[in-house]
Amino acid sequence: MLAKRIIPCLDVKDGRVVKGINFLGLKEVGDAVELGRRYALEGADELVYLDISATLEGRKTFAELVSRVAEAVNIPFTVGGGIRSLDDASRLLDAGADKITVNSAALARPELIGEIAAKYGRQFVVVAIDAKKGPDGRWMAITHGGSKPSDKELFSWAQEAEARGAGEILFTSMDHDGTRNGYPCDTYAALSDRLSIPVIASGGAGSVEDIAAVLTEGKADAALAASIFHYGQYTVAEVKRQLAEAGIPVRI
């Protein structure tokens, strides 16, 4: 069995790492480069940096930050936020990112996935899906940082993204984001069963047990977490040690 990955997520606004609950109430938690360096030293498999303000000026500033992160950490990292074109993706990959993630722009113009994959390879393309569960039980994708509903349903959109060239799917449950109440494991398992590419689980990690559940019952290939690391509840090393003790394959 392939080792499961533990991936700290760093939401970046104006060069600083922030965290909220259900995408709201953002609080500053630290320096983007220093936190990334710390998590790498603790044994993180990868990092994800998301530019959540993503204005045109912010993207330029973000590329400079990506260069500094690339110099500071020795593990793969993914960057996203405001990537609307092949040129945007190229700028961040050229700055030192190992992968890029696209969300709103891919929903607006799905061809973007294939354009990036054609130039760099599908292993460079992570399609992020932020979704909420509606009254009818369907999970619907939400765009623009969780502010605009779309007409795309989670499972069908993830399958389309894979067909268009996505190398991984990063699914964040907006209903669980920042709550530390656990992941919706049944949904992750259903998503993993429909795809042949890795699924990264995001939104809801409150304990090692939550992470273990989504990696086993939820069949996720990787777990993304923010609050439990940013606020010192666990180190990455502690999480991985406890997962290994539970028989879950991780790189120690």
Image (cartoon, rainbow, N blue to C red):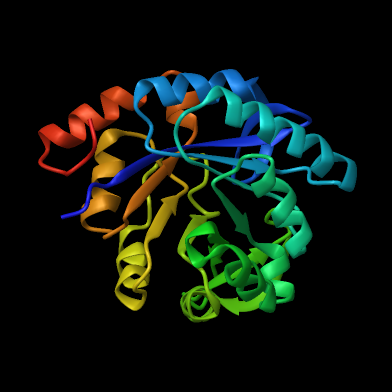
Residue lying at the far right in this picture: please name it.
Answer: 57
Expressed as whole percent of the image width and height from the top left, the position of residue 12 reads 68, 34
Q: Nearer the viewer, residue 202 or 44?
A: 44
The image quarter in which residue 242 lies: top left
> Residue at point 73% right, 66% down?
105
Q: Nearer the viewer, residue 182 or 229?
A: 229
Q: Nearer the viewer, residue 235 or 24?
A: 235
Q: Is residue 2 visible?
A: yes
Expressed as whole percent of the image width and height from the top left, the position of residue 202 reads 46, 49
The image quarter in which residue 174 lies: bottom right
Taking 71 as reference, is 5 left or right? Answer: left
Taking 171 as reference, is 50 left or right? Answer: right
Expressed as whole percent of the image width and height from the top left, the position of residue 220 reads 32, 57
* As drawn, 85 above or below 222: below
Taking 107 as reference, is 167 left or right? Answer: left
> Residue at point 75% right, 37% down?
62
The image quarter in which residue 106 lies: bottom right
Quadrant location of the C terminus in the rendered image: top left
Q: Is residue 234 visible?
A: no
Quadrant location of the N terminus in the rendered image: bottom left
* As drawn, 243 above or below 16: below
The total of numbered circles placed on residues is: 0
> Residue at point 46% right, 65% down?
167
> Residue at point 77% right, 64% down?
85
Expressed as whole percent of the image width and height from the top left, the position of residue 74 reads 46, 29
